[in-house]
Each structure stands twice: as structure tokens, then as C-alpha cells.
């Protein structure tokens, strides 16, 4: 075997290794999924995922959009009094209104947020604010931003927003 043949084989091996590494990298990267599946795939949002299912909103988050969901974490729901959670469980319309208050009918990445008010799916206005990279919605702070889905984006927040009673 000549030096140039050896070099060509080495390049082929290197090329094959690079292609294989690229294919492995692609296989480990999850394919984009809808908002409902993104909720289901995020362990810190399991309470919200269960409430979305209970309210019958899974199909909306699967096929509708684009939406921005300000998604309260499990810890945010733990801070809600048990009596309030029981009341929501018994009243599907109140639960739907509460969940819809956390959703905006547009895709808003954190970089797109301006100090302004936006209308929620529930119909009430939400105050958004941004200082540097810090984003808030009403009294909730975004703790994890820009979780992309095929039909929108999730931002995890640290507080469950109380839905206005009068719309």
C-alpha cells in the first residue's frame, strides 16, 4: 500500500466517522413536537399537564396555535391553596378560564417581549415586562424561557396567575 492510498483510506475513515457522529447527533436531538406533547415531556410541568387534560384542552394545544403558554411549574401549583385547587377540580369552566389566562394566541419568544399588555386566550389583558433578559408576566417571573414547540412556545413561570373574575 502506498502512502497516498493510506492517506485516502484515512480520509475515508475520517469522513465515515464524521458522518456517523452527525447521524448519532441527529438521533439524540428530539424532533419538534406540539405544545401538548412538550408539556407532557417536561417533568416540572406535570401538574399543568394533568390540569390541561382534565380541562379538555390537550387537543387545542396539540392542533391549535401558534400559542405562547406561560406555564406554571409544579412548585407554582404547590403554592396554590388546596381549597382553591379542589374548587378548580370541581368546576371545569373555572379551570379552563384559569388555564386560558396563561395562554396568548401568538408565538412570543423572550427576545420579542416588550413592556406592554397582550390579550390572553381567556380574554383578559396580561401585563408583560422585560428588564434585560428578565421577563415577567403579571406577578410571575419566567424561570425558563423559549421552550419551542411546533405550534408555539412555552415559558415556565414561578407563579399561577389568578384569572380575573370579570373577563
Image (tube, rainbow, N blue to C red):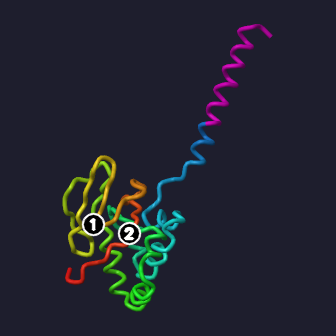
Quadrant into which the N terminus falls: top right
Quadrant into which the C terminus falls: bottom left
- Dot 1: within a 10 Å radius of its alpha carbon, few (fewer than 14), some, or many (20 or more) residues? some
Residue range corresponding to the magenta coloring: 1-21
Percent across and percent down for residue 110 are 33, 52
Q: Pointers 2 and 1 in contact (CB under 8 A)? A: yes
* Residue at position x 47%, y 72% in the image: 49
Q: Verify whether residue 72 appears in magenta.
A: no
Closer to the camera in the image, 139 or 43: 139
For label 2, the residue is 159
Q: Identify the image quadrant of residue 98.
A: bottom left
Q: Residue furthest right?
A: 1
| Local secondary structure at mark 2 | loop
Q: CA distance from mark 2 to mark 1?
A: 9 Å
* Residue at position x 51%, y 71% in the image: 46
Q: Identify the image quadrant of residue 99.
A: bottom left
Q: Identify the image quadrant of residue 107.
A: bottom left
| Local secondary structure at mark 1 | loop
Percent across and percent down for residue 8 are 69, 16
For label 1, the residue is 138
Percent across and percent down for residue 129 are 25, 57
For the stretch drawn in magenta, the main secondary structure is helix
Amino acid at each position: 500500500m502506498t502512502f497516498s492510498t493510506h492517506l485516502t483510506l484515512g480520509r475515508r475513515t475520517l469522513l465515515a466517522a464524521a458522518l456517523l457522529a452527525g447521524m448519532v447527533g441527529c438521533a439524540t436531538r428530539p424532533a419538534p413536537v406540539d405544545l401538548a406533547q412538550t408539556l407532557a415531556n417536561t417533568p416540572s410541568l406535570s401538574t399543568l399537564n394533568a390540569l390541561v387534560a382534565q380541562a379538555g384542552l390537550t387537543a387545542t394545544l396539540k392542533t391549535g396555535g401558534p400559542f405562547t403558554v406561560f406555564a406554571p411549574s409544579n412548585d407554582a401549583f404547590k403554592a396554590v391553596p388546596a381549597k382553591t385547587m379542589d374548587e378548580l377540580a370541581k368546576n371545569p369552566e373555572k379551570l379552563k378560564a384559569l388555564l386560558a389566562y396563561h395562554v396568548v394566541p401568538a408565538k412570543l419568544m423572550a427576545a420579542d417581549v416588550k413592556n406592554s399588555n397582550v390579550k390572553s386566550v381567556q380574554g383578559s389583558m396580561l401585563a408583560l415586562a422585560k428588564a434585560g433578559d428578565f421577563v415577567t408576566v403579571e406577578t410571575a417571573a419566567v424561570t425558563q424561557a423559549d421552550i419551542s414547540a411546533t405550534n408555539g412556545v412555552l415559558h415556565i413561570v414561578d407563579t399561577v396567575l389568578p384569572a380575573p373574575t370579570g373577563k
